[in-house]
Image (spheres, rainbow, N blue to C red):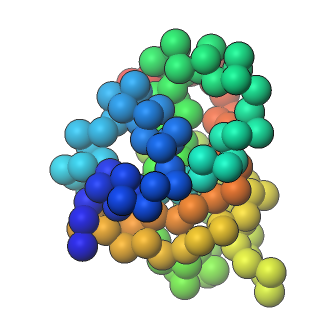
């Protein structure tokens, strides 16, 4: 088993999110600390974001830290755990709304497309779109 960063690298489907995590300065945390639950947009999810918008986001490390922190929650939450809760507090300090049905689990209405990739320092769930923090004007801690 590998850490969250190595697990995402090995999958080959999360390169954009990994780039954003690195620009935001979160790689050491997701490599060495934990446990964390990461809700990770696939590269396909980012392919729907216009390139000029992605370039703009990549150039703002503070905004990137807000965005990437919103995709990570402290603790290890398996899909089984997610089915029994209504919300989880993200590392940004704001709640992610969890919904569960016969069709699967959503985070802020974004479906989990692949669940329960266990890592040495947490767990990853692949999601079909990026999560947008409710207040991007916050000053990063």
Query: As rendered, which of 32 and 6 lies closer to the eye?
Result: 6
Residue occupying image coordinates x 23% and y 39%: 28
Q: Is residue 114 visible?
A: yes
- On the rendered image, what quadrant is the N terminus found in? bottom left
**In this image, 27 relative to 63: left or right?**
left
Q: Can residue 69 be seen in this view?
A: no
Is the residue 86 above or below the residue 71 in the image?
below
Residue occupying image coordinates x 70% and y 73%: 105
Q: Furthest-left residue in view? A: 32
Residue occupying image coordinates x 52% and y 55%: 13
Is the residue 31 above or below the residue 11 in the image?
above
Q: Furthest-front residue in view? A: 12
**Residue 18 percent location from the top left of the image:** 43, 41
**Residue 47 percent location from the top left of the image:** 70, 40
Query: As rendered, which of 74 and 116 lies closer to the eye?
Result: 116
Tell me which corner region of the image, top left, top right, bottom left or bottom right, holds residue 61.
top left
Query: As rendered, which of 5 and 68 lies closer to the eye?
Result: 5
**Residue 66 percent location from the top left of the image:** 52, 30
**Residue 119 percent location from the top left of the image:** 31, 68
Residue occupying image coordinates x 59% and y 71%: 114
- On the rendered image, what quadrant is the C terminus found in? top left
Is the residue 83 above or below the residue 44 in the image?
below
């Amino acid at each position: 088993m590998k850490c969250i960063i190595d697990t995402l690298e090995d999958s080959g489907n999360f390169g954009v999110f990994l780039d954003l995590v690195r620009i935001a300065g979160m790689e050491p945390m997701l490599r060495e600390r934990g446990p964390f639950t990461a809700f990770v947009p696939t590269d396909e999810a980012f392919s729907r974001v216009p390139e000029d918008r992605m370039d703009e986001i990549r150039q703002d490390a503070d905004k990137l830290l807000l965005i990437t922190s919103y995709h990570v929650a402290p603790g290890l939450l398996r899909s089984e755990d997610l089915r029994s809760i209504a919300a989880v507090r993200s590392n940004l300090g704001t709640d992610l709304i969890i919904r569960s049905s016969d069709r699967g689990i959503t985070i802020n209405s974004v479906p989990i497309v692949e669940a329960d990739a266990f890592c040495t320092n947490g767990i990853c769930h692949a999601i079909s779109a990026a999560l947008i923090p409710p207040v991007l004007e916050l000053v990063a801690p």
